[in-house]
Image (cartoon, grey):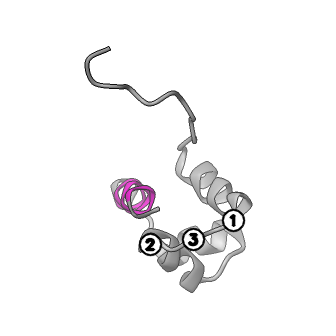
C-alpha cells in the first residue's frame, strides 16, 4: 500500500489539489486521504474513489519474472 500511497500523493500534487480538496470531492475525511497516502490499508471502494478523482486507474497484471 505504501507504493500506491506515494503514487496517489504524487498525482494529487501534480494536479495542484490539496488533501482537503480530494477529501471533499470523494466525500471522505482529510484523515482518510492522509492515511491512504501514508500507505495504510483502505477498502477497495475508498481507493477506487480517490483514483477516479485523480484520473488514475488500478490495473492487475501478471508479474514480470526475470529471465523469461
The residue carrying mark 1 is 43
Residue at the front extreme?
67
Q: Residue at x 59, y 79 (%)?
A: 32
Q: Residue at x 62, y 69 (%)?
A: 42
Local secondary structure at mark 2: loop
Q: Position of residue 48 (x, y in %)?
A: 66, 53
Q: CA distance from mark 2 to mark 3?
A: 21 Å
Q: Position of residue 14 (x, y in %)?
A: 34, 54
Disc 1 packing (10 Å; few <14; some 14–19; many ≥20): few
Residue at the left extreme?
67
The residue carrying mark 2 is 18
Local secondary structure at mark 3: loop
**Of the two numbered discs 2 and 3 in the rendering, the one whose residue sits closer to the viewer:** 3
Q: Which residues are magenta?
A: 3-13
The picture quadrant where one finds residue 43 is bottom right
Q: CA distance from mark 3 to mark 1?
A: 7 Å
The residue carrying mark 3 is 41
Among numbered discs 1 and 2, the one appearing first in the sequence: 2
Q: CA distance from mark 1 to mark 2?
A: 21 Å
Q: Judge by depth and name the residue closer to the eye, 64 or 59.
A: 64
Amino acid at each position: 500500500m505504501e507504493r500506491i500511497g506515494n503514487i496517489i500523493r504524487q498525482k494529487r500534487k501534480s494536479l495542484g489539489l490539496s488533501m482537503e480538496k480530494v477529501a471533499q470531492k470523494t466525500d471522505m475525511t482529510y484523515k482518510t486521504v492522509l492515511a491512504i497516502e501514508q500507505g495504510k490499508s483502505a477498502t477497495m471502494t475508498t481507493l477506487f474513489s480517490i483514483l477516479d478523482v485523480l484520473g488514475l486507474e488500478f490495473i492487475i497484471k501478471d508479474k514480470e519474472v526475470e529471465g523469461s
